[in-house]
Image (spheres, coloured by chain):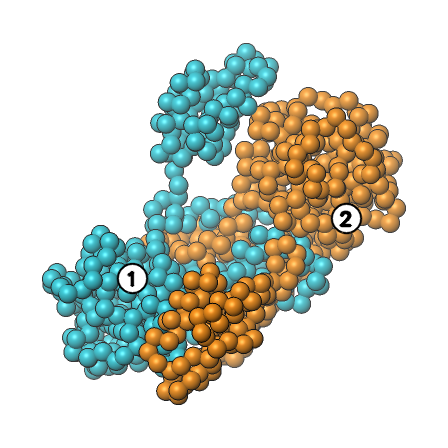
Chain colours: A cyan, B orange
Amino acid sequence: MSRLATTTLRPMSRAVSERPALDGPVLVVGAGLIGGSVAMALSRAGIEVFITDVDRRAAHVASSRGAGSEEAPDPDRVRLVVVATPPDHLGSEIIAALETYPRAVVTDVGSVKAQAWAEVAGSRADARRYVGGHPMAGSERSGPMASAPDLFEGRAWAVVRRDDCNAAAVASVRALVEACGATVVEMAADDHDTAVARVSHLPHLVAVLAAGSLADAPRNHLALSGQGVRDVTRVAAGDPELWRQIVLANAEALTLLLTQVRDGIDDLVESLGTGDGERLEKILRAGVAGTEAIPGKHGGATRLFATVNVSIPDEPGALARLFADAGEAGVNIEDLRIDHDPGRAFGLVEIDVAERRAESLIDALRARNWSVHR
Amino acid sequence: MSRLATTTLRPMSRAVSERPALDGPVLVVGAGLIGGSVAMALSRAGIEVFITDVDRRAAHVASSRGAGSEEAPDPDRVRLVVVATPPDHLGSEIIAALETYPRAVVTDVGSVKAQAWAEVAGSRADARRYVGGHPMAGSERSGPMASAPDLFEGRAWAVVRRDDCNAAAVASVRALVEACGATVVEMAADDHDTAVARVSHLPHLVAVLAAGSLADAPRNHLALSGQGVRDVTRVAAGDPELWRQIVLANAEALTLLLTQVRDGIDDLVESLGTGDGERLEKILRAGVAGTEAIPGKHGGATRLFATVNVSIPDEPGALARLFADAGEAGVNIEDLRIDHDPGRAFGLVEIDVAERRAESLIDALRARNWSVHR
């Protein structure tokens, strides 16, 4: 079960050689969007994959799209089982997998963890071989036709462990995450459920309410829909049956957050009623702070900018020439401040550019006789 | 002022020749995101543009980025004024423009209309030369560095008129919209404000509340942020000072909608408390219906699919071969249903593809000996 075991006789691809080895065969239980995508990602990485589903047609479609074999594997050979069923069946499927595949590590991709953990812990199954997982990727589409092997590239994937988890099992699930191109975020089960209530389930419900108010809107009103409303409501197109199970499984954490949003609405309604602009702006500023708190896509900080300072003569066309020179150097100017009133002989322009492009911009502008410093 | 007037001595570009003629010079008042983008779009289309701003540096930056001249135009030559100032100054700037530019049509790009209309109607200015406008495009960024000439391509742009509007003025504003690459949606002022409360301002406030709950979340919780929460909250990064003005100007319509969302939250909290899955699913289904009500980007219906039926033999690899053949034909399969249990000799597969690709898929599959019909 150790990820250190040498694997042989397995087709090697570039992707595999760059990432930690994951031992196969892997069995994926559930051929929906997520299960199908995991199976496709692992198959593409050269790992032996089996895929199964209570709906044999779903498994057949997934298999035909490159998600591995739909045959039943030899139970003693399976090294890792990925349970990718809807939340209502998560606990029982994890327990069944632990019992059916005695040498396998078992993980899952469920959106809520505490309930499944409790079921596994309360069973006779060997819970030390179970490590929870939750890839933070999805789509408003569902089913094996929506699956894609690159669904998890650059996404976060929660690995949810307890102290008594087998260390080799944790290593195996980490290797699964990395083989799928995602980034491991280790968490405890309770902490995970509170986190996803806030970063996934609450945004989903809020999008559902905003979208719900469009359902009976006049057609000419809807004709004014721009990118904003499309982005805000996109996730609300997700499968209602799946989301019913998710939000019910995380009811406690969600109720608390929904109550806070209701307080926020009361605050907005009162501010609008009294015309209290300061209070409104405070609420709007908290929203801006929230968007800034979301880290960059790869789990790191938001994109960093560097400031480059350029002295420019106050003459017609000077700033336009600066834009043209920066453009020719292939550097995108993200923002800009001018530190003087036009009218003086020289002014200082502060240019914000992507951190890693700053040096080449400075070189390019100096070569064109601009006076530049950081 | 008529759009039918022949214009001469104006640089012609391809874009101009394809679109209805707009008479210049055009003066854009306000060099922020929207004003700068309008000015850049018109300049690119070969129309003579002047741009001004109370902050001369903003006008200078916009002008240097290709948004026209920052010089003051001859008031008698100006044919169209586009007022692109924040909502609080909209009415007074429209009135000032009607008075300062006696031969010009005046329009604006404000998010809320009723208040500005009332101010204009209550003034001594010639209100027949004013036609409201509202492009349904924006960005979470602001200022002239965020402007782009293609910001309005394919977007809706409300043209808000009253019965006493000069017909030539309406034609002129329609020509402006088309010169910017957007689609005209004509509406009355009250109707416009109710519409944008629903498709723009409410989604914005809902995004603000969802984002606000992230501001003080633990760092490791935020590490689980996926694309969903980014999309739901993106617009909440918008300028708080601008949005304060917008929501206050549309307070009445927004209060009604916010109250409905509050009822929706009460509904959710009760359903979670009693574990009422059916009631939850009903709310979730209304959200799905809302996303389906939003028309396609260009104001038309959502993308249409056609179903193509293929008989496939029940033998290993038949479905995989079908996927490979469709892929070689360059047709993307959007969804698929299998109408039999695997185990019978033949089955029917229903394939959904983009309407306009159906015929070429049928031809390609028949050429590869598949039995196909629509």
Q: Position of residue B1 (x, y in %)?
A: 83, 35
Horizontal side of residue B265 vs A131, given as left or right: right
Q: Chain of mark 2?
A: B
Q: Amino acid at mark 1?
A: Arg
Q: Which residue is mark 1?
A: A44
Q: Can residue A191 be seen in this snapshot?
A: no
Q: Quadrant of the N terminus of chain A?
A: bottom left
Horizontal side of residue A134 vs B19, given as left or right: left
Q: Which residue is mark 2?
A: B160
Residue at (15%, 65%) from the top-left corner? A9
Q: Is residue A100 above or below residue A306?
A: below
Q: Amino acid at mark 2?
A: Val
Kindly indicate the quadrant of the structure image that contains residue A121. bottom left
Q: Is residue A319 above or below residue B321?
A: above
Q: Is residue A370 above or below residue A51?
A: above
Looking at the image, the residue that sits furthest to the bottom is B344
Using the image as rendered, state which of residue B298 and residue A197 is in the foreground.
B298
Using the image as rendered, state which of residue A75 and residue B359 is in the foreground.
B359
Residue at (37%, 60%) from the top-left corner? A151
Q: Position of residue A275 (x, y in %)?
A: 67, 48
Instruction: Evaluate if marks 1 and 2 touch, with contact meaning CB atoms under 8 Å apart.
Output: no
